[in-house]
């Protein structure tokens, strides 16, 4: 393998566009560049038709109706719209929201804002596998609870929460259920209506579509969920989200959804084989290498590993920028705090800071996985050979 080859194993942070997606988008930058809200000429009609077609492709992927898809700028906005929109709309019913400590910052930071505006938020804990306790969820629901917000699959560990059981509990208690499903949509079957999910946020750039476009699924029948809009002006998207639609982005998102639906089954098998190869090789050949999170309830494209007494930032340096992976959470990696997801699972700071997330995707090859295995093993050996702490650990002193 060439020395300068760059290997991308950070698909949970973002994915490159599929070339078929870009091809579908191109005409909408040029000859068909109308505003989908322009009703008086063909440019507008073409754009409107393209948006409607994409809405259909996306609705099909999640088995929803077209009018249940609200286009947004991404999952961060979808999370904000769902949480703040429900909080404001259902204020008379109650002010209590339940979420989980391991949620994405786009949910957690939004919940902090809601608390500042008079909301009450319960943050459920997780066990060492990253899973919530359903009994704790049940007993946290009270008369003032309006919303349960639980992500489908965790971005750092891939751990999947028991969506069906959560949906059943919410149904029994008569509270709305929202899920940040950004890491699940397009990779596994995600049909919110079957599971009693009333709102679901996701984004194009985690499923081989362009950045800056996403969607919020909003259940429209039994129950009809209403939201207070967070962006006003013009009443686009049934008044829930104003602003000129990002037509090329939406077209790309639609194409990405269509491809995902056609290919996800095969792709899931291929990726889980590659992921398992990587994980088994490292766990077997590197001393004190541990998988973080449930290996039973987990997405097939990701593994989060800790290497005891190896600083993950240091390990990255040994890759000479040939392998792109994540330490902690990319969104907070400006800070050197250990990942809030791993610490919520009970990892000590030291182990959390020795963790690396490898996330695979559509363009990952077996050759790349083989090269990565070699590089990681060599890097860990190199760092531990120089580490007094590792020596002490081996002698049983720490
Ligand atoms: C990436 C991600 C987001 C943010 O999505 P954007 O479209 O980049 O705003 C939110 N939640 C999860 C779980 C994610 O992985």
Image (cartoon, rainbow, N blue to C red):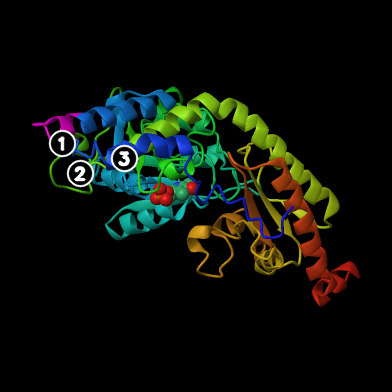
Segment tinted magenta in the rendering: 37-45
How many other residues sit within 10 Å of disc 2, few (<14), some (14-19) or many (≥20)? few
Q: What label sits on residue 370 in the rendered view?
A: none
Q: Which residue is mark 3?
A: 248
Q: Does the magenta-highlighted stretch encompass residue 182?
A: no
Disc 3 + disc 2, Cβ < 8 Å = no
Disc 2 + disc 1, Cβ < 8 Å = yes
**Spatial CA span between label 2 and label 1:** 7 Å
Q: Which residue is mark 1?
A: 37
Residue 152: percent from left, percent from top: 50, 38
- Height in image: 292 above or below 254? below
Q: Residue at x 11, y 31 (%)?
A: 41
Quarter of the image where the C terminus is located = bottom right
Q: Residue at x 78, y 70 (%)?
A: 383
Q: Secondary structure at mark 1?
A: loop
188 and 14: which is toward the camera? 14
Residue 178: percent from left, percent from top: 39, 38
Discs 3/2, front: 3
Q: Which residue is mark 2?
A: 244
Residue 203: percent from left, percent from top: 41, 42
Residue 281: percent from left, percent from top: 80, 47
**Spatial CA span between label 3 and label 2:** 12 Å
84 and 49: which is toward the camera? 49
């Amino acid at each position: 393998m060439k020395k300068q080859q760059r290997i991308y194993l950070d698909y949970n942070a973002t994915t490159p566009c599929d070339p078929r997606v870009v091809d579908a988008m191109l005409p909408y930058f040029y000859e068909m560049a109308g505003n989908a809200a322009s009703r008086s000429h063909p440019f507008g009609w073409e754009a409107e038709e393209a948006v409607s077609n994409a809405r259909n492709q996306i609705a099909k992927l999640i088995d929803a109706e077209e009018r249940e898809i609200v286009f947004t700028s991404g999952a961060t906005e979808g999370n904000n719209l769902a949480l703040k929109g429900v909080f404001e709309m259902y204020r008379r019913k109650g002010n209590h929201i339940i979420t989980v400590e391991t949620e994405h910052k786009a949910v957690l930071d939004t919940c902090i804002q809601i608390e500042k505006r008079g909301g009450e938020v319960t943050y459920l804990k997780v066990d060492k596998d990253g899973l919530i306790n359903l009994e704790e969820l049940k007993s946290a629901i009270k008369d003032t609870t309006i919303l349960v917000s639980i992500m489908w699959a965790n971005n750092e560990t891939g751990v999947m929460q028991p969506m069906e059981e959560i949906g059943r509990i919410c149904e029994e208690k008569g509270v709305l259920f929202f899920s940040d499903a950004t890491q699940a949509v397009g990779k596994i079957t995600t049909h919110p209506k079957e599971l009693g999910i009333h709102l679901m946020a996701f984004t194009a750039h985690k499923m081989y579509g362009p950045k800056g476009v996403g969607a919020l699924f909003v259940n429209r029948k039994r129950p009809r969920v209403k939201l207070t809009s967070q962006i006003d002006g013009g009443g686009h998207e049934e008044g829930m989200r104003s602003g000129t639609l990002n037509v090329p982005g939406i077209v790309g998102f639609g194409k990405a959804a269509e491809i995902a639906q056609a290919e996800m089954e095969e792709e899931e098998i291929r990726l889980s084989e590659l992921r398992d190869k990587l994980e088994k090789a490292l766990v077997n050949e590197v001393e004190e290498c541990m998988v973080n999170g449930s290996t039973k309830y987990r997405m097939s494209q990701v593994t989060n590993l800790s290497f005891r007494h190896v600083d993950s930032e240091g390990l990255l340096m040994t890759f000479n920028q040939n392998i792109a992976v994540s330490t902690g959470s990319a969104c907070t990696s400006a800070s050197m705090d250990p990942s809030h997801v791993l610490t919520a699972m009970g990892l000590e700071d030291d182990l959390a800071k020795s963790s690396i997330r490898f996330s695979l995707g559509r363009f990952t090859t077996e050759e790349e996985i083989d090269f990565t295995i070699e590089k990681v093993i060599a890097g860990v050996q190199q760092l531990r050979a120089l580490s007094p702490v590792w020596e002490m650990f081996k002698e049983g002193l720490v």
